[in-house]
């Protein structure tokens, strides 16, 4: 698929421009690579575009372009661009320095930018001709994102987003006709800022040392690198304002230097193009591995669950949230799955209690599940998923979200199987699991789909179908637990729907129950679980390909590069750790969390099934680096070492955290540890790999019946 790249300088009517050819079909150029944006004293924006004044050869592979730019107000700027051409590896490294030679008081601020245009004579809309990937923000045509999300409007002319909002700092433009693509990645020094940015106000400050990347969608579509990093026509400071502009002051002491890399490639389809470029830049940004004592992480997590799990007004469960780092209980209500994860917490109490001879923990776990089994379907077709302790009743105005119910029911089934393995059979739990499976069958659409949420009578209250994937793993495991073909048939029918509706269209939408029905990370996680389970069920290779697609999409939300983050609000620990392993949550904002802690087991298993080493490496990274924000080694000053902050924003480089722990945070940290230990007999991927037998493990599957040797 890799083709020849060529690079030229060429005379234009505006100086000396650049041209780049990739293969026989893809042509890129810019007749005006020197672009200067000026903020004038009255707040006006003026843009000046020029070619280079002259080009000099440094050596056979490096060239320098220079230009002097003057403004009508009297300011003078010197541009120096050094191009390092690597045709073999299809990349061009560009190092730019801009110096203020003369400053006029009427020119208040400046930014510079570099662009690469695609030569394509088309009359179609931008989104009919190209697809775009920005990790964690923009996928293909961003179909399904909420209205205020970046790139939600495909009729805008300009799209700029600061690089710290990206899981990796690059933007990729793909030609749908040729399959060729080009990307620009920030490859210079780590972004820095000395300003706590809270608004979209046009800031002028010399400490703003970060870039933005984006696109201008006009007659010639142009990839853009802008420094310092303005955002627009959508920004996440104030969605009511289109732009959040950033500039350096026009002073001769300002440092205005940066480095970026242009890279070319080709792929047969959207998945291949996305995967190839993500992995290219993932390999460029070498990550540190933050090894930790995983067994202690698990111990701390279960102990934390034990501490907070107690009877509240006659009901056994865990509070909805507590403060971090203080550990103060602030909301006492129980959510069955999703962020509350009551029944998953119950499973871990039961598992730990049996393994370590702590009957008190086992009884607590049973008490949690007994509450949901005995009461959640009172006057309700599906289990009610949110229980208020004061007063003691289920929330009447909260529907049964499929995601929340599926999580909760998986916890009950897992706990049932674990107890059964150890000699205790809870028939009423399995009957409850069957009831949920039967009622899913009754509401399943003719196309195999399920609705996003249901009311008390089983009626649809949200018609979105993307959450169909959420119940597939549960149905597969229910089949393995009961050997009843009806659950197998229901799972396959739902899987066939998801294969066409989600995988083939690359529409991973609505994975979370508390966000709008938008593109988000957890939709891919749920699809990954579903497709892996369907492979276990059928051994059909198509489910492995679908699982790989979901996994590739999912990992592009994970921060895999490092920039400094200062404390501001919430749990201020980012002077001691970095953000790698944390992952962006959804389109429409830049908050990140520890959710990828759920997935090391699944990525490692995908490696065993495919032999793709990248999945093993990524599994190891998220196994360890997602634990940075826990206090397993006692360095963060948490009231309990298992406490971990749910989420926060690091994109502005000032940590804006929620300062809250919810039960799901601990389940995310410990679930893969438990699965690795149950299946492989160890929690360390490095040790597991030393004894792995791929042919043996590929014959196994991850369904809970085999998982617990039922």
Image (tube, rainbow, N blue to C red):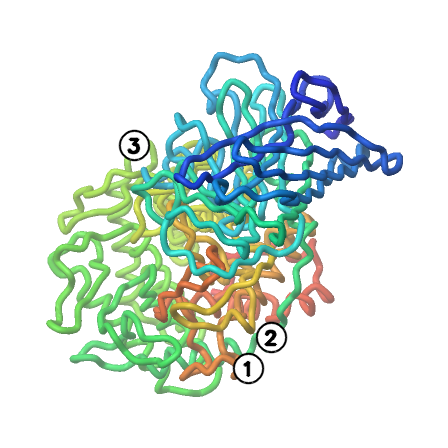
Label 1, label 3: how far apart the Cα atoms are: 53 Å
In the picture, measured across the screen, residue 559 lies left or right of residue 375, that is right
Q: At 62% from the left edge and 25% from the top edge, which residue is drawn?
A: 179
Tell me the residue that label 2 is attached to.
Answer: 292
Characterize the local packing of mark 2: few (<14), some (14-19) or many (20 or more) Cα atoms within 10 angstroms.
some
Taking 697 as reference, is 375 above or below it?
below
Q: Earlier in the sequence, mark 1 or mark 2?
A: 2
Tell me the residue that label 1 is attached to.
Answer: 633
Q: At 27% from the left edge and 49% from the top edge, which residue is drawn?
A: 438
**Whole-percent x, y for residue 323 in the image:** 33, 75
Question: Residue 446 bears which disc, if any?
Answer: 3
Task: Identify the element where label 1 is drawn.
Answer: loop
Q: At 30% from the left edge and 46% from the top edge, which residue is drawn?
A: 516
Task: Identify the element where label 3 is drawn.
Answer: loop
Does residue 696 appear anywhere in the picture? yes
Tags 1 and 2 in contact by the CB under 8 Å rule?
yes
Does residue 539 appear anywhere in the picture? no
In the picture, measured across the screen, residue 30 lies left or right of residue 8, that is left
Q: Looking at the rendering, which quadrant does residue 92 occupy? A: top right
């Amino acid at each position: 698929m890799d083709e020849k790249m060529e690079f030229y300088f060429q005379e234009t009517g505006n100086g000396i421009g650049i041209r780049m050819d990739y293969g026989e079909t893809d042509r890129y150029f810019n007749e005006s690579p020197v672009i200067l944006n000026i903020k004038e004293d009255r707040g006006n924006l003026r843009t000046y575009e020029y070619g280079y004044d002259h080009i000099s050869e440094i050596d056979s592979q490096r060239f320098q372009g220079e230009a002097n730019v003057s403004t009508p107000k009297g300011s003078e700027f010197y541009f120096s661009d050094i191009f390092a051409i690597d045709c073999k590896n299809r990349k061009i490294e560009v190092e730019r320095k801009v110096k203020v030679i003369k400053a006029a008081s009427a020119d208040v601020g400046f930014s510079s930018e570099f662009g690469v245009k695609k030569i394509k004579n088309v009359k179609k809309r931008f989104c009919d001709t190209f697809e775009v990937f920005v990790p964690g923000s923009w996928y293909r045509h961003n179909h399904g994102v909420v209205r205020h999300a970046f790139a939600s409007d495909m009729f805008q002319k300009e799209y700029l987003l600061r690089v710290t909002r990206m899981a990796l700092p690059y933007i990729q433009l793909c030609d749908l006709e040729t399959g060729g693509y080009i990307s620009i990645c920030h490859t210079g020094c780590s972004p820095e800022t000395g300003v706590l940015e809270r608004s979209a106000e046009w800031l002028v400050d010399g400490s703003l040392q970060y870039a933005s990347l984006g696109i201008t969608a006009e007659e010639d579509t142009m990839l853009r690198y802008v420094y310092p990093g303005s955002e627009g026509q959508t920004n996440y400071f104030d969605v009511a304002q289109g732009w959040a502009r950033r500039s350096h002051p026009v002073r001769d002491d300002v440092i205005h230097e940066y480095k970026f890399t242009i890279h070319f490639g080709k792929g047969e389809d959207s998945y291949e193009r996305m995967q190839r470029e993500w992995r290219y830049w993932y390999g460029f940004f070498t990550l540190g591995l933050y090894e930790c004592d995983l067994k202690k992480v698990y111990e701390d997590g279960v102990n934390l669950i034990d501490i907070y799990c107690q009877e509240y007004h006659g009901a056994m469960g865990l509070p909805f949230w507590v403060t971090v780092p203080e550990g103060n209980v602030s909301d006492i209500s129980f959510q069955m799955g999703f962020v509350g994860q009551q029944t998953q917490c119950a499973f871990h109490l039961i598992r730990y209690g049996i393994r370590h001879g702590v009957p008190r923990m086992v009884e607590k776990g049973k008490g949690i599940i007994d509450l949901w089994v005995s009461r959640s379907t009172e006057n309700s077709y599906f289990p009610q998923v949110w229980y208020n302790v004061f007063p003691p009743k289920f929330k009447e105005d909260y529907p049964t979200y499929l995601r929340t119910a599926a999580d909760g029911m998986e916890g009950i089934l897992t706990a049932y199987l674990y107890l059964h393995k150890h000699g205790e059979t809870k028939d009423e739990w399995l009957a409850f699991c069957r009831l949920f499976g039967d009622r899913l069958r009754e509401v399943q659409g003719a196309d195999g789909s399920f609705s996003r949420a249901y009311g008390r009578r089983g009626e649809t209250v949200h018609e979105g179908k993307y959450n169909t994937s959420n119940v597939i793993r549960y149905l597969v495991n229910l089949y393995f637990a009961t050997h009843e073909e009806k659950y197998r048939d229901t799972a396959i029918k739902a899987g066939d729907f998801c294969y066409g509706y989600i995988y083939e269209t690359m529409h991973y939408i609505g994975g979370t129950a508390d966000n709008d029905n938008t593109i988000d990370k957890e939709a891919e996680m749920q699809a990954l679980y579903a497709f892996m389970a369907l492979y276990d069920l059928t051994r059909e290779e198509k489910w492995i390909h679908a699982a790989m697609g979901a996994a590739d999409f999912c990992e592009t939300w994970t921060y895999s590069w490092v920039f400094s983050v200062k404390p501001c609000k919430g749990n201020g620990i980012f002077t001691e750790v970095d953000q790698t392993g944390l992952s962006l949550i959804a389109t429409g904002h830049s908050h990140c969390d520890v959710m990828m802690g759920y997935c090391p087991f699944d990525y490692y298993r995908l490696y065993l099934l495919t032999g793709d080493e990248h999945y093993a490496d990524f599994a190891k990274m998220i196994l360890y680096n997602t634990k940075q924000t826990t206090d397993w080694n006692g360095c963060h000053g948490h009231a309990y070492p298992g406490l971990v902050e749910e989420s926060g924003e690091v994109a502005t480089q000032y940590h804006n955290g929620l300062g809250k722990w919810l039960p799901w945070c601990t389940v995310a940290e410990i679930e893969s540890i438990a699965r690795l230990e149950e299946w492989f007999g160890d929690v360390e991927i490095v040790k597991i790999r030393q004894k792995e037998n791929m042919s043996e493990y590929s014959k196994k599957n991850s369904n809970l019946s085999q998982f617990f040797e039922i």
